[in-house]
Image: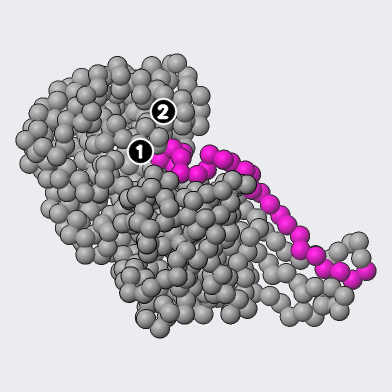
């Protein structure tokens, strides 16, 4: 990701990044470490500044001390004094209650004055690292103070998930934002798409004829997407009660991964060409009728159990969670993408908290050949598997069959594995490095376009409404297991199984 042409970098990327929520967890854990490493990799332009907007009464020295401690704790690289010196010169703390619309005019004057010093050309990145209920308020403040769109400059609005809590609220929020910012200037961030292996899906598919020629329903038996977490909700019980796994993981991360796996080759590598092909996948998902949902969806909620040999609480015992909560912490389902490439090939997805492993992977199971080479004294041949490992192991795993040279007629599965263990591939600043760099470049390929968000909410809403109409026998899986028994039965009734490789 390193660029050598620093003059071009400085000219194109110069800006002031205004972070609303500058004292928050996201800024300290993800954004500041990411910017530090971008400086280290020479990807931040010379004419660049960061204005951290916060409501806390801090001096700039106190704020810089907090940032340095966060980088020390969360950065993938150790603190280098020269790099830190450059970063701290860029950072400015601005105390401001962003819910007070009368104060935005003063913020504008401050930014304009800073711009004359930084020489950033009037370009702005407005990063909303705040709770979703403040998105609309901040956008209104930017509009009222004439900070949103300026002639001969660019302004970009970055919004963290969740974008709405259902289709209705997402549409209302989008309408309000579009009154101020055009679609091309809105960057709806999903940190998952910043992960290297997620980006590698397209390279693996479209850069290797051996895979792309087989990437269809003629050769692939099923696709499995699994995102599992050992962690529970911790102190986020209040948030999770409102979100649940479907809003927290399915509507964004899972469906985004699905689109990259199932999309058609784009006509070119321009961002709108790629996003259009992703959108076609969402439109092709089989309709979630009540009968379909009854037979193909499993909800779960974790109870007490053991994680890494230590006892942990059940979800209903977590902080800020009602003792009778019906919120799901696990979802598994089967769906179909009804187009010529994928018709008839099931996609199985599962995601949940307090599971036995913390991992994310995509398993492509190819169709099995007739067991002509099957002998009575050996097991059936294992299918060919292509596994795309996202975290914590990162890389590609391929399983194929070969002769067992230790016997006369045996067949054994052989594994080719390019994966390497990287404990930093969780929800870390690394993903944000790529995404922040893309925001500065104006490349929205890895960000969700509105029609993608709308289609994802259309599908997720039906799942949420179905779950809310039914009573679930929660909790229905122990912490430290891999989910409810019915999640395994979901595949077993099709003669398949979840792969744990």
Labels 2 and 1 touching (C-beta < 8 A)? no
Q: Which residue is mark 2?
A: 70
In this rendering, does residue 114 appear at all?
Answer: yes
In this rendering, does residue 249 appear at all?
Answer: no
Quarter of the image with the C terminus is: bottom right
| Residue 323 horizontal/vertical position (percent) | 38, 58
* The image quarter in which residue 362 lies: bottom right
Q: Earlier in the sequence, mark 2 or mark 1?
A: 1
Q: Badge 1: how crowded within 10 Å, few (<14), some, or many (20+)?
A: some
Q: Residue sitting at 26 percent across and 42 percent down?
A: 130
Q: Residue sitting at 47 percent across and 63 percent down?
A: 475
In this picture, residue 397 sits left or right of residue 118: right
* The image quarter in which residue 248 lies: bottom left
* The image quarter in which residue 268 lies: bottom left
Whether 430 is among the magenta residues is: yes
Q: Residue sitting at 31 percent across and 56 percent down?
A: 242
Q: Which residue is mark 1?
A: 26
Nearer the observer, 458 or 322? 322
Above or below, 367 against 320 in this view is: below
Work out how far the residue at label 2 is from the one at label 1, CA to CA, in angstroms.
11 Å
| Residue 431 horizontal/vertical position (percent) | 44, 42
């Amino acid at each position: 990701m390193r660029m050598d042409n620093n003059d071009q970098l400085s000219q194109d990327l110069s800006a002031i990044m205004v972070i609303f929520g500058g004292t928050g967890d996201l800024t300290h854990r993800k954004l500041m470490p990411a910017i530090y490493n971008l400086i280290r990799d020479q990807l931040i332009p010379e004419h660049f500044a960061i204005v951290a907007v916060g409501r806390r009464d801090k001096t700039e020295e106190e704020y810089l001390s907090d940032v340095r401690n966060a980088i020390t704790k969360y950065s993938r690289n150790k603190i280098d004094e020269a790099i830190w010196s450059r970063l701290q010169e860029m950072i400015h703390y601005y105390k401001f209650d962003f819910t007070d619309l009368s104060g935005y005019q003063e913020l504008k004057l401050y930014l304009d004055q800073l711009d004359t010093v930084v020489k950033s050309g009037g370009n702005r990145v407005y990063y909303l690292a705040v709770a979703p209920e403040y998105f609309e308020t901040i956008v209104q403040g930017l509009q009222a103070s004439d900070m949103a769109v300026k002639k001969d400059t660019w302004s970009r609005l970055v919004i963290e998930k969740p974008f709405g809590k259902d289709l209705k609220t997402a549409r209302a929020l989008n309408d309000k934002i579009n009154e101020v910012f055009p679609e091309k200037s809105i960057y709806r961030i999903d940190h998952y798409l910043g992960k290297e292996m997620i980006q590698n899906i397209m390279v693996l598919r479209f850069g290797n004829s051996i895979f792309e020629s087989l990437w269809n329903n003629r050769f692939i038996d099923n696709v499995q997407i699994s995102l599992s977490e050992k962690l529970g909700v911790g102190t986020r019980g209040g948030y999770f009660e409102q979100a649940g796994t479907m809003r927290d993981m399915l509507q964004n991360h899972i469906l985004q991964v699905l689109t990259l796996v199932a999309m058609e080759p784009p006509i070119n590598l321009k961002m709108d060409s790629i996003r259009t092909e992703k959108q076609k996948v969402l439109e092709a998902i089989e309709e979630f009728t009540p009968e379909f949902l009854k037979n193909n969806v499993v909800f779960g909620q974790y109870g007490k159990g053991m994680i890494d040999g230590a006892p942990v609480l059940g979800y209903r015992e977590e902080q800020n969670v009602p003792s009778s909560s019906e919120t799901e912490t696990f979802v598994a389902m089967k769906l179909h993408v009804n187009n010529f490439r994928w018709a008839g090939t099931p996609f199985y997805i599962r995601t949940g908290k307090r599971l036995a492993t913390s991992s994310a992977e995509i398993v492509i199971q190819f169709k099995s050949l007739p067991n002509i080479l099957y002998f009575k004294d050996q097991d059936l041949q294992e299918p060919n598997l292509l596994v795309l490992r996202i975290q914590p192991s990162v890389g590609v795993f391929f399983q194929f069959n070969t002769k067992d040279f230790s016997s006369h007629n045996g067949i054994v599965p052989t594994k080719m594995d390019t994966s390497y263990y990287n404990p930093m591939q969780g929800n870390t600043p690394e993903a944000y490095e790529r995404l922040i760099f893309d925001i500065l470049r104006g490349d929205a390929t890895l960000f969700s376009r509105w029609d993608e968000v709308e289609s994802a909410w259309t599908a997720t809403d039906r799942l949420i409404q179905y779950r809310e109409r039914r009573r679930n026998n929660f909790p229905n899986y122990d912490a430290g297991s891999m989910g409810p028994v019915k999640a395994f039965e979901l595949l077993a009734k099709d003669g398949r199984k979840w792969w744990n490789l």
